Image: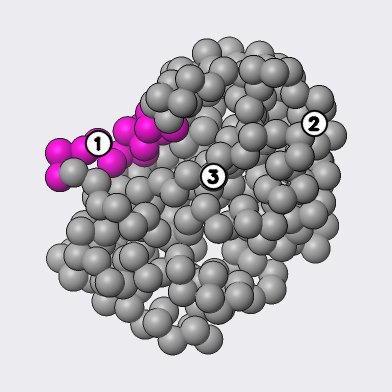
Amino acid sequence: MLVDGTLWRNVTPPLEGRFRCIVPDWPLGSHTLPMKPEADITPRGVSRLIGELLEALDLSGATLVANDTGGALTQMLAVERPERIARIVLTPCDCFDNFFPPLFKPLQYAARVPGALNGLIQPLRIRPLRRLPIAFGRLTKRPVPAEVGDGWLRPFLSSREIRRDTARFLRAIDAKDTLEAAERLSSFDRPVLLAWASEDRVFPLEHARRLAEILPDARIAEIPDSYSFVPEDQPERLAELILEFAGTPKSAERTSSAG
């Protein structure tokens, strides 16, 4: 939520010599092109968009790399439309009953009251406030560069249609979707890397261990000195792990990111 593809700006450069890296902006509040009013912007609907992107680009053998909300969407895709996925890398993300994490529930509640979500987010125009826990303070160990944070927030702050999309997605979040996906993840038999921050307090390491117990072919790589946004706090280490995990790609294989 409220992050675009620039979250991966320091992860993809070391990978681009070995993989084709695709870093889409999903309609989660930092997108610049509003969705049509009739579009399905529920979590399941947006997870299907990931599958539709793979299909539209005719990608097969893809490695999906996901963080935060994108990890929940990737879990849903893995149990509903896994045919184009060869591997998955999950960094700290929503799963089980932690969708949304309690810390960010106020965003979900505000989305149900006309104007309240806008009132909650507008103060983040003031850059120091972005270090508050309900903003990015618990997600990144170090401050996000001001210009990057500006880019994440600008679409929501400046567009009524983007605010509409964001509120629609937030209202539709329900842990039953991630719990349902968890019940079916044992059917996903492709390799999964759980590149988890050992210090994360929003998405605890215990959740990675629970996922590893369910997934048939999963391993955990603990990443120190990072909070939830591992692509922000430890991009070089994450890129190393992805290179090691994905190996030498076959000609048909591609790397995609869900942020």
**Residue 208: in sight, yes or no?**
no
**Residue 182: in sight, yes or no?**
yes
Q: Secondary structure at mark 3?
A: loop
* Residue linked to disc 2: 245
Above or below 49: residue 5: below
Q: Who comes first in sequence, dot 2 or dot 1?
A: 1
Separation of residues labelled 3 and 2 (CA atoms): 19 Å
* Residue linked to disc 1: 40
Above or below 228: residue 90: above
**Left or right: 74 in relation to 13:** left
Residue type for callout 1? Asp
Q: Who comes first in sequence, dot 1 or dot 3?
A: 3
Q: Quadrant of the N terminus?
A: bottom left
Q: Position of residue 146 (x, y in %)?
A: 55, 79
Above or below 130: residue 251: above
Separation of residues labelled 1 and 3 (CA atoms): 21 Å
Residue at (32, 33) in percent of width and height: 45
Q: Secondary structure at mark 2?
A: helix
Of 18 and 121, nearer the camera is 18
Residue type for callout 3? Val
* Residue linked to disc 3: 23
Which of discs 1 and 3 lies nearer the camera? The answer is 3
Residue at (49, 84) in percent of width and height: 127
Residues in magenta, as a range: 37-50
Of 133 and 241, nearer the camera is 241
Of 97 and 140, nearer the camera is 140
Q: Position of residue 212 (x, y in %)?
A: 71, 29
Q: Secondary structure at mark 1?
A: loop
Q: Who comes first in sequence, dot 3 or dot 2?
A: 3
**Circle 1 Cα neighbour tier, 10 Å, few/some/many (<14 / 14–19 / ≥20):** some
Residue at (81, 51) in percent of width and height: 237
